[in-house]
Structure formats: C-alpha cells, structure tokens
Amino acid sequence: MEFHESCYKEFMNYLRPFGDERLQFLLYGMREKSAGPFRVPDLSGWPHGTELKSFAFTDEHWPVVIELFEFWSSGFPEHCEQLLLASLSALTGQGAILSWYMFEGTFNDIAHVFTPWTIERTYGVARPGQAPRLAITKAARQQKSWRALAEQVADALYHAYPELQTVAGNGNVPNNLDEACT
Amino acid sequence: MDDVGASINGGGRLSAGEQGGKALGFVRGLGVTAVQGMRAGGGHAIRHLEAGGLIPSAGSLTSRVRAFEHIAVPILENPTDTFPWTLGGLPTRGFLGTYQGQQIAIFVAQEGPYQGKVVAAFIPTPAQLIAMRVAHGVP
C-alpha cells in the first residue's frame, strides 16, 4: 500500500518537530561497539534535496553503539513505505542488532528503548531473522500486535545485553517539581 | 505574570525570568533536575548542539552532558521566551535562550515517563523561530 498524504496527516505532523516544512525521519541502528560503523543510507528514492545527518550515541559502559540517521526530506517520499522498509533491511544486512524508526523526543534511555510509551512513538522495527515491520498510523501503533512485537524485540535485546538495563539509569525518572519545591 | 510556564507539571514550578520578566523558567536551582539522567540517552537530546559546535563532540559523554548542562540550566531558569510545543506528538514546553550569541531552543516533556526532562535541544533557524513565536501568539 502506498502512502497518501491525506491519510497520514497526523504522521506527517509528527515528522515536523521543529516548526519547518521539512519532514524528519529518525532511523536508529544498534550495533556492537566492536563492529564497524554502518554505511550511510542510500538517498535514491528520497525527494530531491533530502539531507542526511548522522550521529552516534554510546557511553563508556555500553557494549553497543546506537547510530542515528536523521533524514530531512523536503516532501513526503513517493514510495515512503518501501524506503523505510529498505533502510531498515539495509541496517539488518550490515549486522545491526536492532533498527527502528521513532519520532523526535522519544528515545531517551538505553535501558528503556521499547516501553509501552515509546512503542506508540515507534513506527518501524527490524531485527535479524525477521522481516522489517512498519506501523505508520496511530491506530497501528496502538495495536496489541505492534506492542507485542516491540516487547519481543526489547526482551531479546536485554536478554542478549542485560548490562544495558543496569549501566544507564542515572536517575532518569519523571521530574515531579511540585515535590521539589515543597 | 504570564501563565505559559505554569503548565509545566501543573503549576508552581516556574518562576518569572529575571531578564525581561515575561518568560517563565524553572525555579532557580531546579533547572538542573531537567537534565538529570541524560547520560541514559547517550547524548541523543544534545546532538544538535554538538553538531552546531556549541558542545565539543569529543570527550566522554559525562563531559559533554556537563557542557550541555552549563548551557541549558541558565536558559531553563531564565529563558527569554517559553512556549507550548508538540514535538513528535509529545507535548513539551520550549525554552528559548541565547548562548554565545546563538539562539537555542530546549524542549522539556510535559507528560510521559520523561515529564520535566529535556528531550531535545537545537539551534533554530529564523523560520523556525517565527513558527515557535506564532505558536504562542507572538507576531
């Protein structure tokens, strides 16, 4: 099924986090620290003028690196679904432990990559041995099957790398400032 | 007193900035609470300031987060402007300020597990600044 802008207005709004017309797609790929960096994703198929920025996140005690490819697209890609799936598959093909698409502001904690809260803000997931999946609409992201898939991915991640749940907490709990003020 | 800041966590947590007086920031001493736990993201929320050269991209994550804290806390406690903003579907409050002559926008989650925490920061373009000011009624 192809994308039609009228059907995905909410999705597109979520892809404009900073107030301009460009669309931001955040593709995350997790790899072991000892593995080489991912290749820069292919921009063919993306609208002319699409910009790509890349970042890498890790900490000294993490066994993994999360690479972020930040696509800034001048418009909605004509074959968006295929592009998203292909880029997820490309990372899996390069040895990614896990790859996913999330909206801005969602990823904040390596120890809680996929929680019920983040899952509803995750619109693509891939891992080795399984076909990549997308959940573009809010209804799709709220389906039990999507939540179950993301929870399976998280379980596998923390089973393989249990230290991720213990090295990164650093007090990242909701900030009740009312209590802090009294 | 402007009421824009009062919606962070339900009110009572923001105070009038000392410069200009119209924007509401975190109560002095509490801005640091918004950046606690940021190491868990590996530097995700500060990446655009690193790319903009305001934070060294080299060095330990701890040092880079501290550099961000040095920039962010004064802005959170004494912003030039604050405004409601939806970021990837997440309700946040934006805090505008200046560092080394650059306008900086910092976004603090208003709900969810990261409520009261910085979830993003970037150097806005003039067009983005206009959009943010329109978002809270500034022409």
Image (cartoon, helix red, strand yellow):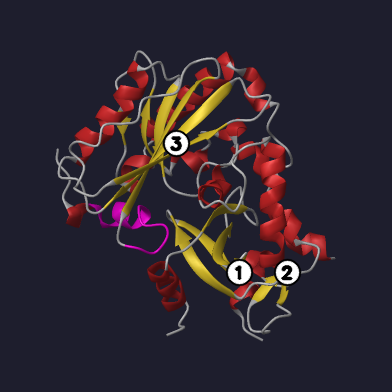
Classify 10 Å Cα crowding around label 1: few (below 14), some (14-19), many (20 and above): many
- The reply to whether dot 1 and dot 3 touch (C-beta < 8 Å) is no
Q: What amino acid does circle 1 point to?
A: Gly
- The reply to whether dot 1 and dot 2 touch (C-beta < 8 Å) is no
Question: In the image, is residue A136 above or below residue A177?
Answer: above
Single out the residue that lies furthest toward the right: A182
Which residue matches tag 3? A68
Provide the residue span drawn in magenta.
Answer: A8-20
Q: Is residue B14 magenta?
A: no
Which residue matches tag 1? B97
Disc 1, SS:
strand
Which residue matches tag 2? B13
Q: Residue at x 81, y 63 (%)?
A: B29
Visible in this render: residue A175?
A: no
Estimate the x, y position of residue A35 in percent, counting from the top left: 49, 15
Visible in this render: residue A77?
A: yes
Label 1 and label 2: CA atoms lie apart by 19 Å
